Image (cartoon, rainbow, N blue to C red):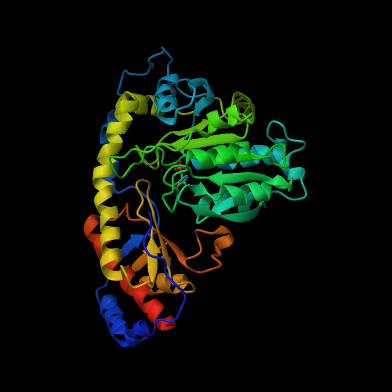
Amino acid sequence: MSIPAPSSGPRTDLADQLPALREQYAALTELGLRLDLTRGKPSAQQLDLAEPMLALPGEGVHTDADGVDVRNYGGLDGLPQLRRIFAELLDVPVDQLLALGNASLTLMHDTFAYAFLWGPPGSPRPWGREEKVKVVCPVPGYDRHFSVCEAFGVEMVTVPMTPDGPDAEAVAALVADDPTVKGLWVVPTYANPDGAVVSEAVARRLVSMPTAAPDFRILWDNAYAVHHLTGDEVKSANAIDLAAAAGNPDRVLMYASTSKISWAGAGVAFLASSPANIAWYKSHLSVQSIGPDKVNQLRHALFFGSAGGVRAHMRKHRDILAPKFDAVNRILTQRLGDLGVAHWTVPQGGYFVSLDVVPGTAARVVELAKGAGIALTPAGSTHPYGKDPLDANIRLAPSMPPLAEVEQAMDAVATCVLLAAAERA
Ligand code: PMP
C-alpha cells in the first residue's frame, strides 16, 4: 500500500511558501535534535524481550533433546531441536535446513564465495572464471546485497519492485538470453525497504522462467518471514517447493535469521535449499568449520520451545514496533498528505518505510535533515552503487528510537521534504 505519487512538475504554491519553510527549518535547527533513523536495528526494549536467554541453557544443561552434548565439536547442520522449530516457520523440510552462525549475511556472502571459487551445482565453470557475472537487483533494495555484489565484482542490473515483489516480466526478459546473468536478489516477505510481499504468481514466474545460465540462482532472503506489524500474518510464496515443482529444484537458496527475533548480534542464521544445494554448501562449509555454536542454538531452542513460541514472541515485538510505524504514516499524512510532494509505503511488516520525494531532492532532504540533527540513510543507498537515477528514494528505519523521538524525527523530515521541494519549485 502506498500514498499519492510526487510529481516533478512546478509547484508555484510551494515556491510562495519558501520563506516560511526556511523559517520553520531554522527553528528546527535551533532544537539541537540528535535522532537516528539510519539502520533497521531493534530497540533496547525489543532486545529486553529475550533477556531470559542470558541465563540459558544454564549450568548443568548441555545436552539437547536428541542427547547431543552441545559443548563439543560437530553437528555441522546445526541443532535438530532448533532446526525443527524453524523448519515449521519457514515451511521447509528439516533435512533441507541448516542452522549456522549469527548472521545470514555471512551465508549470502559465502554462497557467492563458493560460487566464484567452485561454481554451484550445474555450473559449467566457477563464476570467478566467467568473463562477466551479472546479478539482477530489484530497486529499491537492501544496500548490503549490493555490497556483496560489489565485493565480488558482480555487475548489478536493476528491475523495479512492485507491490507483489520484483517485476517478474522484467526479470524474465533479462535472464532469457544472457548467460552472464547468474542471480537475482529477492526479499520475499516485507521487503527492505518497501515492505512488498512476493505473491504466488510472481514466485511461480521467477522459479519457472527459462534462464540462459544453467546455474542461475535466486537468493531468497527471507529476513522478515515472521516480522508482522498487524494481526494479518501474511506468508510469502514457498519458492523452494514451487521451484522443485517447476523442474528447477536447485534455483532457490533461502536465508533467514533470528537477528530481529532474539538478538541482532547473537542470533542464529538459517539456510534452506534443495538437497543438492545443501550438500554443495556443506561440502565447502565443512572445510571452514567443524560445527556451529550449538550452545547458542540450544539457548534459542529452550527459550522459544516451539514455532508457536516464536510467533508469540514476535507479537511482543509487534506491540513495540507497530505504534512507531503508525506514527510515521500519521505524521507524513498530516504534514504532506495531499501536497503531491511525497509518497510512502505503509508496510504490514518488516523494518522499513520507503519514502519517495520530489525527484532530484532526496539527497537534499537527507542533507537538510542532517543539518537539523537527524541522521537518515544516505540517499541512493537503496540502489546499486549508491546511485538512485531519480534521486527520489529515502529509506526510513523507525525501529530503534523511542516513539516520542520517531514522532519528532518524522515531523522534522516532513519539513525537510517540503523545504527541498519548495527550493526546486
Ligand atoms: N537481509 C535483509 C533484507 C536485512 O534487512 C537484514 C538486516 N538489515 C539482513 C539480511 C541481515 O541479516 P543478518 O543479521 O541475519 O545478517
Residue 400: horizontal and vertical position, in percent?
31, 53
Question: Which image quadrant for residue 122?
Answer: top right
Q: How many marks?
A: 0
Residue 85: horizontal and vertical position, in percent?
39, 24
Residue 27: horizontal and vertical position, in percent?
25, 79
Residue that protrudes farthest toward the left in the picture: 404
Which quadrant is the C terminus positioned in?
bottom left
Residue 83: horizontal and vertical position, in percent?
44, 24
Question: Which image quadrant for residue 121?
Answer: top right
Vertical arrangement, residue 182 with respect to residue 13, above or below: above
**In this rendering, does residue 67 appear at all?**
yes
Residue that protrudes farthest toward the top in the picture: 67
Question: Which image quadrant for residue 356?
Answer: bottom left
Identify the residue shown where x is 31% and y is 74%.
415
Using the image as rendered, state which of residue 72 and residue 5 is in the foreground: 5
In the rendered view, does 86 fall on the left or right side of 245? left
In the rendered view, does 420 fall on the left or right side of 407? right
Identify the residue shown where x is 64% and y is 49%.
135
Identify the residue shown where x is 40% and y is 77%.
421
Vertical arrangement, residue 185 with respect to residue 95, above or below: below
Identify the residue shown where x is 47% and y is 75%.
8
Using the image as rendered, state which of residue 278 and residue 167 is in the foreground: 167
Vertical arrangement, residue 327 with respect to residue 105, above or below: below
**In this rendering, does residue 143 appear at all?**
no
Using the image as rendered, state which of residue 229 and residue 300 is in the foreground: 229
